[in-house]
Amino acid sequence: MNEVKKIDYADDGQFCSGHVACAGCAEALAMRVILNSVGQNAVGVVSPSCSAVILGGHPLSSARIPFLHGTLESAAASASGIKRALRAQGKDDTTVLCFAGDGGTYDIGLQALSSAAERNEDILYVCFDNEGYMNTGGQKSSSTPSGAVTGSTPLGKATQKKNLIEILAAHRIPYIATVSPSHLNDMAAKMDKAKAIRGTKVIIVLIPCLPGWGVADHAAVSTARLAVESGVFPLLEIEDGLRTRMHPEHKIRPIDAYLAQQKRYRHLSEADRAALQAEVDANWARLSAQAAL
Amino acid sequence: MNDLTSPLWTNLTSRERITGTWRSALPNYQNQPSPCLNACPVNGRIAEWIGQVKKGDTKGAFVTLADNNPFPAIAGRICHHPCETACNRNELDETVGICSLERFVGDAALDQGWGFPAPPAELAQSVAVVGGGPAGLSAAYQLRRYGFRVSLYESKSALGGLMRWGIPAYRLERAVLDGEIARITAMGVDVHLNAEVGDADALAALRREHDAVYLATGASLPKKLPTLDYAAGWVVDSAEFLAAPADQQSARTGDHVLVIGGGSAAMDVARTARRLGRTVTVLTLEPEGSLPAQKVEVDEAAEEAIRFVSGAMLQSAEAGDGAVTLNCIRVAFSKGERPGAFRVDPVAGSEFALSVHTVIPAIGQDADLQRWAGLLEATGPVIAAGKDWQTSTPGIYAGGDVASMARFVTQAVGMGKEAAHAIARALAPDIARAVPAELPEVGYDRINIAYQEPHGRTHQRLTEVAERLTTFDEVQQPLSADEAKSEADRCFSCGSCIYCDNCYFYCPDMAIARLGENGYEVDPDYCKGCGLCVAECPTGSIHMAKDDNA
């Protein structure tokens, strides 16, 4: 039927008002879903990032579970240690999760994450990917997509976004998923699934950064939706690094509307946009072929 | 903040921080008018009653509909439905079939025998309503709802006005008409049939006997073509033709009938004559595609093998041996500025002739202003009335065709309603309905269509042409219950909250509380004023408002 599909996850108050995320921040919106999915029996590690700021401000916390504020390199390593300590105490059912940004995942924390993934540590690693060091004024990271202007790429980034999904898939970890703040039911469902899997799980959340991307305060969700609908950010799951599942029906439009909503792409020429479109289409075709296997 | 002594771990939640102070604007829940509501001649709360149909609450939908229109089954058949033209859904795929849904609700009400409740209290004041057509009945209904004593004077032998004497049964089944009128008279209207109020003196007398009078006598005088001899046996008056029983209609018409005019009445005459087995030609000044009749009427007439000669004018008629020769000429037609005004320029050398047996001019009706001369002033072709529909004589109100050039049935219903509320404001200001506040209309840009999927409209079925021409049974068939639900689900509910919880779930600050039936509440302590709730609202029923208090 043609009714408005309702969002239906239970908010048990695991994420509290009064946090200091920017007005309209999609990262806070995603944390709300994720923390309520994870529930009370959990311990978190957060690396320096927007997440750390949103969760903290000592001695206040916006999460109802304990979070260890660690270093930028070590989120996955810290989580591994906490999980092993809990197991030693017989608390194996406690979920251990990491919150990190793309800087702490694609760049500075990659070694620790790779090591934990190789050991298949039983952790749930969430990367809030806003495609740059947005917490420190908006510098580029290796997650910044080609063409995007950041504080350190004033003419637009010359190289492509690092393909972390393929790096992680190469580790053959049990579960990798991408989620978007525009698809909250999908996000909640994937969190539930990840929670039930033992081993290393990585969830990558696309976070359109309002100041960093130059998006209006009310438009984070619609920008994320356009990223999904244009195939820029495919919603997918990869199990054991091999089995890919995605939604072929999601890609319904060219990237123009997605680009138009962001100041970081404003300088692009017609040829630049065509090149980006070709990049998106090629990536989509490769993923589709993978999903068809 | 109290105990901040622990050096190592947090001891309070972030709720200690009142981040609402960052805000410069605050979301405000307010249902605002949809384009269909503003386009509706009775300003029906369409999004609201379709929402009730979605939930399966047909009775609730009837109650909402009847707040502004006591004739949902009639309007659902014959309304010119400007709501559907205005529908925001046209931007996505196709309008919601509002009219067919209204019929669905109206038919259910008649089938189930749902009536109107008695007024909360009987009032001492009385109002006379002169004319039992759509405007008069609508006014009588609204006045009875308040509890006024209502005396209704109708010159003919039955109520209904144009709906009974002008609209054929194949468009409006008589049982439907009778049923919806009976529901009004059952409220305790004192009906006087065959009671003509013949002149200004009689009207003035009524005014003395009642606290107010509502005049809705319609437009009873046919406009005349100077080129036609109305005394000739082969000329038949369209209003008399439509009002007559079928045997008389047959007796008055020859094999080939020419109908002159492009409005609804002309279509009704032509299609009635077709059902009598006649060959029918329609002659219109307006070019093809611009006839004043509803498109659906023209289309159905064409399906019924009625021939249209459009963009042409009758110049003279000569009666010959059994047939009449009509000398016509092509014309260039241009619309004037006032409604109904136009200009035609004959195209030289384009003369042609038609040969027929009967001519039925149906070029419109005029209000009989002479009858009220000396008591009521006129503006152009109609009785002059102010914004509250009061005439030049205090206490006498007027509406419908006698006071307006807006000539669709539902426009008359809307005028009757407005006048009744205006009369109530004059006679019983404490209980009268206030003039509704003007709120901005919710346009397509306010609908978040990410929550809508293209889904074609479910049209009403039409009876097969061959079958139509053998009876006066209705052509348009009703929607089934499943079809009605599916069609109702297509409604965006523009400007009306559907309690989908999007605002609650999309708030990054958990600043929106769900109050069940009572909707939602914004917590000003934590709302940062980002507007995500407004952006993700599928119906445009939340609005950002500047907030200086934060």
Image (tube, coloured by chain):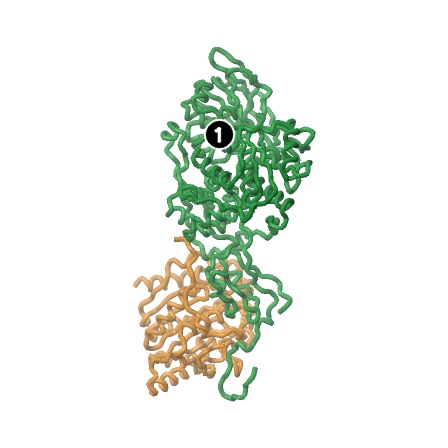
Chain colours: A orange, B green
State the residue at coordinates (33%, 63%).
Answer: A291
Residue under circle 1? B267
In the displayed structure, does residue A151 sit left or right of residue B467? right
The answer to whether any part of residue A157 appears in the image is no
* B197 is higher (above) or lower (below) than B496: above
- Looking at the image, the residue that sits furthest to the top is B321
**Label 1 secondary element:** helix
Residue B214 occupies which quadrant of the picture?
top right
Return the chain for callout 1: B
Q: Nearer the viewer, residue B311 or B306?
A: B306
Residue A65 occupies which quadrant of the picture?
bottom left
Quarter of the rendering occupied by the N terminus of chain B:
bottom right
The image shows residue B488 at horizontal and vertical percentages of: 43, 49
The answer to whether any part of residue B214 appears in the image is yes
Residue A203 occupies which quadrant of the picture?
bottom left
The image shows residue A212 at horizontal and vertical percentages of: 54, 70
Quarter of the rendering occupied by the C terminus of chain B:
bottom right
Q: Amino acid at mark 1?
A: Met
* A123 is higher (above) or lower (below) than B206: below
The image shows residue B36 at horizontal and vertical percentages of: 52, 47
The image shows residue B266 at horizontal and vertical percentages of: 51, 28
